[in-house]
Image (cartoon, rainbow, N blue to C red):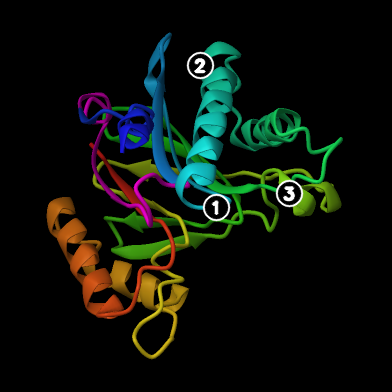
Amino acid sequence: TYAKTIQHTVMPLEVNITRYFKYFGIFIPLQIVSGDFYWFTWVPDNDKLAFTAAVDCTGHGVPGAFMCMISTRILSETIVEHKVYDTARILELLNEGLVAALKQEETDNNDSLEICICKILRTGDTDYEMSFSGAKRPLYIYHSDTQDLETLKGDRKTIGGLMSRRNMLPFTSETRQLHTGDRIYMTTDGLINQFDVNNKKYGSDRFVSLLKTIAPKELPEQKAIIEQEYETYKGSAEQNDDITVFAVELI
């Protein structure tokens, strides 16, 4: 329980996020501490530039929480201290840092993480440039002018672990021009992989359909709907993974 208090110190403070965005965060650990987290930082010497991420580390409970602490340290060092702002390069350095921290070149440790990360740069009063990179996690973008929901898939490669060593292709990035009122959704696979009482997964298609329905609504209402959707679908079944959904609205 005390470890939970420590883990929450790496979660972003509302006062910091709301300087840049409207947002909601859903964070439902499987155990007291979590292998999931959502993350935010701004660039100290550029108040128009911020980064958001949702991260899913191997394991639950204490092992997952240790992974969270390692990965948040590497992310902060890479972006804030070393001033690396290219999202694909950030994932490359996160991969190198995690492999080194876990000594995966010398041991049989196979822990890994999945992540979607966004760089969001304000380019005008109502204009933004968003760059995204993903390691086995997608990004969902709601375009308020067309009311369309766009999915960016990311790369089929983890950070750390055996898959990252077998797949030598570099991480990639995608860029979109966005505007005030657009919304960005980042999620781990916890809700998508939740089973109901009939042992059936919730699934990506159902989640995307839910987002398409609720994306025009105000963020607090969206959060409440997703939380209720999860409880209704799970029913009396056991929760089987950490669950995190992080959404930001450009303002």
Question: Bounds of the magenta span?
Answer: 15-35
Q: From mark 3 to mark 1, how far is it between C-alphas?
A: 11 Å
Q: Residue at x 35, y 65 (%)?
A: 148
Label 2, residues with CA under 10 Å away: few <14, some 14-19, many ≥20: some
Task: Assess whether mark 3 and mark 2 are in contact (beta carbons under 8 angstroms).
Answer: no
Residue identified by numbered label 2: 80
Query: Which comes sooner in the sequence, label 1 or label 2?
Result: 1
Q: From mark 2 to mark 3, how far is it between C-alphas?
A: 28 Å
Measured as percent of width and height from the top left, residue 65 is found at: 48, 40
Name, please, the residue furthest toward the top.
45
SS assignment at label 2? helix
Q: From mark 1 to mark 2, how far is it between C-alphas?
A: 27 Å
Q: Is residue 26 magenta?
A: yes
The label shown at residue 173 is none
Q: Is residue 38 magenta?
A: no
Question: In the rendered image of this protein, does residue 33 appear above or below residue 185?
Answer: above
**Quick one: 66 or 182, which is closer to the camera?**
66
Residue identified by numbered label 3: 110
Q: Report the amino acid beneath label 1.
A: Gly
Measured as percent of width and height from the top left, residue 205 is found at: 44, 77
Nearest-to-viewer mark from 2 and 3: 3
Quadrant position of the C terminus in the picture = top left
Residue identified by numbered label 1: 59
Quadrant position of the N terminus in the picture = top left
Quarter occupied by residue 194: bottom left
Q: Is residue 84 left or right of residue 239?
A: right
Q: Report the amino acid beneath label 3.
A: Asn
Q: Residue at x 23, y 25 (%)?
A: 19
